[in-house]
Image: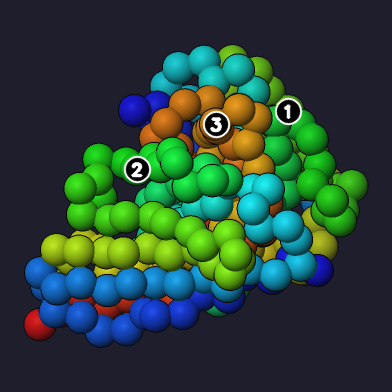
Amino acid sequence: DIQMTQSPASLSASLGETVTIECRASEDIYNGLAWYQQKPGKSPQLLIYNANSLHTGVPSRFSGSGSGTQYSLKINSLQSEDVASYFCQQYYNYPYTFGAGTKLELK
Amino acid sequence: EVQLVESGGGLVQPGRSLKLSCAASGFTFSNYYMAWVRQAPKKGLEWVATISTSGSRTYYPDSVKGRFTISRDNAKSSLYLQMNSLKSEDTATYYCARHRTMGILGYFDYWGQGVMVTVSS
């Protein structure tokens, strides 16, 4: 199985700040990576797919990048509504695996 | 608007069975792979099952293979998850998700609100 190592586990940032979340795969996943946002008490929502493609309706302050085994999610100009947990998921191969998540809070 | 509404959760004893349902609307259900993803309390996400558009192909992780069965009824725009021989570690919120695939692999672009399954004596 492909292991997804996500960092940091938690993050505290100020409004307007830029934050970056990383995900490392245990082998090359050839951009088969998605990012999800999960607000407290809600279901996950797709943000990014194919490592860098923005899902419909997602604000442009979210962006994804990376290749090979290293990927990142960047949030520009942090807003209060971005407080959530973020998860990466590889879909290069079955079984699909997720990162353990990053909890983003406001400072 | 894509809508996925799960039902059928609840409290069940270890070793017993439970069947979850997901009613889909707002899109042509038969054109999409579908999936179940679960989340144990205060934990991360775990993919549970995927089914192809016709239902002829199904995929599972080892943790549920042989115990869980995913199925679908395209005429009813409904997805199901039959869970047998339940264990305490199956306790989780179960999400129905629409599956965008490139070939047989892909990501989840819409999720239901989730249904809680508690396995306990």
Local secondary structure at mark 2: loop
Mark 2, residue position: B60
Q: Is residue B68 found left or right of A63 in the rendered image?
A: left
Residue B1: x percent and y percent? Answer: 80, 69
Residue B69: x percent and y percent? Answer: 32, 55
Mark 1, residue position: A65
Q: Which residue is at 64% across, 23% downward?
A: A31
Q: Are marks 3 and 2 in contact (CB under 8 Å)?
A: no
Q: Which residue is at 72% across, 49% downward?
A: A47
Identity, as a three-letter code, of the amino acid under mark 1 = Ser
| Label annotation for residue A76 | none
Identity, as a three-letter code, of the amino acid under mark 2 = Tyr
Q: Which residue is at 58% across, 22% downward?
A: A70
Mark 3, residue position: B104
Q: Is residue B84 found left or right of A3 in the rendered image?
A: left
Q: Which residue is at 39% across, 35% downward?
A: A95
Identity, as a three-letter code, of the amino acid under mark 3 = Ile
Query: For residue B88, which quarter of the picture?
Result: bottom left
Residue B81: x percent and y percent? Answer: 38, 63
Q: Nearer the viewer, mark 1 or mark 3?
A: 3
Pointer 3 and pointer 2 on the same chain: yes
Up the image or down, B56 lies above or below A40; here it is above
Q: Is residue B6 found left or right of A64 in the rendered image?
A: left
Say which chain tag 3 marks: B
Q: Residue furthest front?
A: B75
Residue B20: x percent and y percent? Answer: 39, 72
Up the image or down, A99 lies above or below A104; here it is above
* Quadrant holding the C terminus of chain A: bottom right
User: Is residue A54 among the parts visible in the rendering?
Assistant: yes
- Which of marks 2 and 3 precedes in the sequence? 2
The alpha-carbon separation of the residues under discs 3 and 2 comes to: 13 Å
Say which chain tag 2 marks: B
